[in-house]
Amino acid sequence: MLQQKLVNDTLLISPRALTNNATVTANMDTKGGNYATIRVCMGSEVNTNAVGPTLVLSESDDTVVSNFTTLDTEAAVDLTAAREVFFGVDLRGRKRYLRIAVSTPTATN
């Protein structure tokens, strides 16, 4: 018997501009999944003084923010040109919820 694979494609964070010292987050329920691909699409920096955002992927058994533990971090992502950052997560043995956080640094320009 051929087993069907369920694919769930969801937009967690819509495209947006972030100001200095801003953070946007989204949680994803992975119940029933075996693998997750997180794609973060980012436009190019506005000027050469811009500092790229920090991306943090975390996991938890519930959606309480303080219970999430970090799986991976991409700091000061280079946005000289527009790009996507990918996270691939094998969900076997992982906690139920994934959380992506996109944070911009505090800057004076």
Image (cartoon, grey):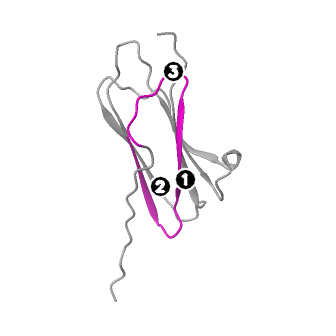
- Which one is in front in this view, the residue at disc 1 or the one at disc 2? 1
Apparent side of residue 8 relative to residue 20 in the rendered image (left or right): left
Residue density around tag 3, few if under 14, some if 14–19, many if 20 or more, within 10 Å: some
In the picture, the quarter occupied by the N terminus is bottom left
- Which one is in front in this view, the residue at disc 3 or the one at disc 1? 3
**Labels 1 and 2 touching (C-beta < 8 A):** yes
Magenta-colored stretch includes residue 35: yes
Among the two numbered marks 1 and 2 on one chain, the one whose residue lies closer to the N terminus: 2
Q: Secondary structure at mark 3?
A: loop
Q: Is residue 62 above or below residue 67?
A: below
Among the two numbered marks 3 and 2 on one chain, the one whose residue lies closer to the N terminus: 3
Q: Which residue is mark 1?
A: 98
Q: Which of the two residues, 89 or 53, is positioned nearer the viewer here?
A: 53
- Which one is in front in this view, the residue at disc 3 or the one at disc 2? 3
Q: Position of residue 49 (x, y in %)?
A: 40, 12
Residues shaded magenta: 14-40
CA gap between label 3 and label 1 equals 25 Å
Q: Secondary structure at mark 2?
A: strand
Q: In percent of the image, x 39 and y 63: which residue is there?
A: 8
In the picture, the disc for residue 20 is 3
CA gap between label 3 and label 2 equals 29 Å
Which residue type carries mark 3? Answer: Asn
Which residue type carries mark 2? Answer: Val
Q: Which of the two residues, 53 or 34, is positioned nearer the viewer here?
A: 53
Q: Which residue is mark 2?
A: 89
Q: In percent of the image, x 50 and y 30: which residue is there?
A: 75
